[in-house]
Structure formats: structure tokens, C-alpha cells
Image (spheres, rainbow, N blue to C red):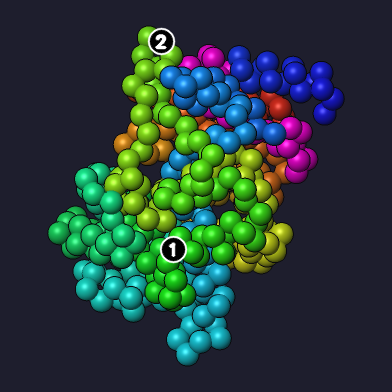
Amino acid sequence: MAKSNNATESTQIKKILKQHHLKGQVLSITNYKNSHEALGYGYANKAENILNSNPNVIYPGASLQKSMTGAMMVQVINDSQKSKNPITQNTLISRWYPQLKNSNRITIGNLLTQTSGIMDNKAEVDPGKILSEDSAVNDTIQRINSQASTMDTGSNKFHYCNDNYILIAGIISHFTKKSYADNLVNRIIKPAGLKHTFMWNQIPQGMLGAHIYKFVDKDYQHGQVPTGSSLSYILGAGNMYTTPSDYYTYCKALKNGSILNNSDYKYMTNLKAQSTKHYNSGFYIDKLHDMKFVYGSLDSVGNANFVNLTIGNKYGVILFANQTVATQSETSVKDAAAQIIKYVAPKAYAE
């Protein structure tokens, strides 16, 4: 894309974001390529005049991390085929969590597709202290057990809950005998060549975590950042930082052999336990329109990330917003992303 077209695209995207009172970074993709690095709009830290265009700014990934956890689970399933106790998507999680109520009726596939029946009204309540990985898993089991009467186990109905992926993170650690954080680095970050993706407690000096703001009559209100306690709590389900550019690199690595090959990716996104929501391993899959989606937000701060890509990563947009309208975060980000993709990649809807 020529520079003049880049400038036109940037102006149009800025106009769309302004319409929805959004600030953040946007990456557009056409024909498998991003024509430029992610475009930054507004401030990542208004008080210190740090712009979202700063190359060292990173954002809470929120639920976009779930697909990374799902991809690692597929790797573990593959690795386990050489062991005495191979794992499949149909393996019951009672193998690892016998103390968890109804675990003898929940499969790994159920966790990956959010069809375990687990419901937890405290799934994103800040515990007020930083938890170790083991504590995060154990606390999750205790919460589920205390609310087990509300579970809909065995129905295969879709109930979105972070706990499913915290339990997956625990299984990955148990199988590999390494921490989830080590697995993320060695199974996702290094193989894919991600330079701006880190666990919440492994951010190197010089990287800048974006502040999260609300638009309330004017820009940059109620600025805050997620606490360590709130992030440690949601292990594998939303406790890493990344950028739109890194996330697109990751999405490509799910098919090109860096993380998974095309066959493994197909397995990851076509699990038998999926409901009519077609949620698989962190992505919503829309085969009819050849699209995949994922939305992520942390309740504690209210950031909003949205990924809208064709299944093969040929066209799309990745929008990370560090400012939204308080009552319209999800709607506004999804609407803005739809407007942007129709502008920069109309072929995504034509093919």
C-alpha cells in the first residue's frame, strides 16, 4: 500500500475511533499482510504524555490469552501420545482434579469449548493478594466446589467462565512439570517470535503497560491499570500483556508450524464438545462467513480488545482499546472493528 493510501487509511480509522470515543492501537490486515505497524491513537498514559504509538506500549491481553492456552493444550495432547497415559479431548479432568465436584463428567474438550457447566460468579473478583499459579488453580477449585449446585454439568450447554481455562493451565503445568509461565514462553512466545508479549509479572524494564481510561463527557477519565492480584487470579485466562502486531504474528503461527501445523489448528478449532456458539479453544468460529472472532476485557479495568480475522488470517482487523465509553465497551469496540474491516478489507466479506 502506498504511503498516501496509508495516510488515508489512518485518517479514516481515526475518524471511526473518534466516533466511538475510542483510544488505542489498530492493526489492519489485507492479503495476509499488515501494510504498516499497528496505528496508535491517543495516549497510553495521559499524565506522562506517552502515546499509544509508542513502540514500547503493551496492553492487557485479557481473554485473547485463552487461545494461547488452548493451543498449548493441543500441543500437550500431541506430546502425550508417546506417554503411558495419552490425553485426548475426551479425557476426563478427574485425572488431575479428583477433588473437583463433577470432574468425572467434564472432559478437556468441555473446558476448551466452555461447555463444562461450570459457572462462577466470583470468576473475576480481585482476591486482594497476589496468588501463585498453584494457589490460583486451587482457589478456582474451591470456588467451583462452593457453587457446585449451580453447575449444569453434562448438558453441553455453553457457559463462558474463566475457570475453564484456569483448569486447563493447571493441566498443562501438571503434564509438563513446568509452570504455565514457562510453557507460555517456550511454547508460544519464543517459537512465534513474539517481542511484545509477556506474562503480567515478567514485563521487562522499558516496556510500558497502557493505562485504561473511560470516556465520561470527555477523554481520559478514571485512568487505572490492572492490579497484580487481579491478574494472578486468572491464570491462563487473561493475565498476559501483548500488542495487536504480536497477536497477529501469533495467529499466523497457529497454522504455519511455528506453534501448530494446519492439521493441529483444524483440530483446535473443531472440537467435538463445541456448542452452537462454535467456541473452540479461545476463538468463536463462523465457518459460514470464514471468520473467527475473540473479544477480551478485564472487569477490573474495562479495557476492550477485539480480533476479527478470516479463518486463514488473510484479512482482518485487531483493535486494542485503552479507552471506551463506560457502558458501551464491547458494543463500541466491535462496531468500530466492523467499520474498519469493511473499509480496509472489503474482500474479507466478498470471498
Q: Mark 2 points at which residue?
A: 218
Which structural element holds mark 1?
helix
Residue 49, image x, y percentages: 51, 19
Residue 23 at least partly seen: no
What range is drawn magenta here? 16-36
Mark 1 is surrounded, within 10 Å at the Cα level, by few (under 14), some (14 to 19) or many (20 or more) other residues, namely many
- CA gap, disc 2 to disc 1? 40 Å
Q: Name the residue under label 1.
A: 180
Residue 24, image x, y percentages: 53, 27
Q: In which quarter of the image is residue 165?
A: bottom left
Q: Please say if 167 is above or below 7.
A: below
User: The C terminus lies in which quarter of the figure?
Assistant: top right
Q: Does the magenta stretch include residue 161?
A: no
Mark 2 is surrounded, within 10 Å at the Cα level, by few (under 14), some (14 to 19) or many (20 or more) other residues, namely few
Q: Is residue 21 magenta?
A: yes
Residue 310, image x, y percentages: 66, 44
